[in-house]
Image (tube, rainbow, N blue to C red):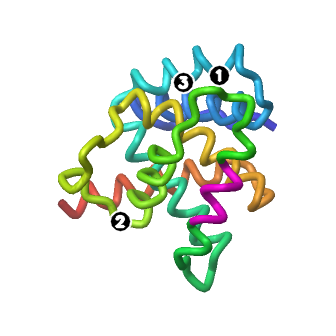
Amino acid sequence: MTTTWRHLPASAREIAEAATESVAAASDRDAAAYGPAVQRLAAADRAGLVLGGVVRLLLEETHPDGLDGDDVRQVLERCVRAADWCPDVDPHVLLVLLAGALGVYDPGDDDSPPDPAAVARHAPLLVADLLAAAGRPLSGYLSAAFAEVARTELHD
């Protein structure tokens, strides 16, 4: 079953479609599809915010008792190993994505924070790996992340 995102505004729909496409390519280890999908994701404004929400939700579900340093290291190592088909994987960017999703990353403290293109190249790899660990599809997590962003914007 394929989820349609027609109910979302155009900008959010673009994020959902680009995220779905790039995570599917990462899950399939399809390098030919991954490049264009990641470019589309990088061009979608606020995609990092939404995918950060997806990562946080997946981490919460797969680690209901919380994460410690060993858990973060295991997630990072598993993701890097799973992405062996993708030659430009940077563990630092994946660690930044994990720390950002957990709310413990301050880009001002990072001498080399990843740019949006690096985030777009790595976030689908992390999401695909976490989805495989959770054994669930992306659509529910995307919906929950969009709802969380909407709630936050409503209260700000």
* Mark 3: amino acid: Val
Instruction: Give neighbour class at mark 3: few <14, some 14-19, many 20+ (Cα, 10 Å).
Output: many
Identify the element where label 1 is drawn: helix
Q: CA distance from mark 3 to mark 2?
A: 24 Å
Given contact means CB atoms under 8 Å apart, are the residues at marks 1 and 3 in contact?
yes
Residue 34: give its label. 1
Query: On the image, which quarter does residue 141 sit in?
Result: bottom right
Residue 103: give its label. 2
Q: Residue at x 75, y 37 (%)?
A: 27
Q: CA distance from mark 1 to mark 3?
A: 6 Å
Residue 132: give its label. none
Q: Residue at x 43, y 32 (%)?
A: 118
Instruction: Give neighbour class at mark 2: few <14, some 14-19, many 20+ (Cα, 10 Å).
Output: few
Q: CA distance from mark 1 to mark 2?
A: 27 Å
* Mark 1: amino acid: Tyr
Q: Residue at x 56, y 67 (%)?
A: 72
Query: In this orientation, which residue lies closer to the viewer: 17 or 154?
Result: 17
- Which residue is under mark 3? 38
Q: Residue at x 55, y 50 (%)?
A: 143
- The answer to which of marks 1 and 2 sits earlier in the sequence is 1
Is residue 133 magenta-colored? no
Is 154 situated left or right of 46 in this image?
left
**Residue stretch rendered in magenta on the structure:** 73-79
Is residue 78 magenta-colored? yes
Across and down, in percent, residue 71 comes to 61, 72
Report the quarter where the N terminus lies. top right
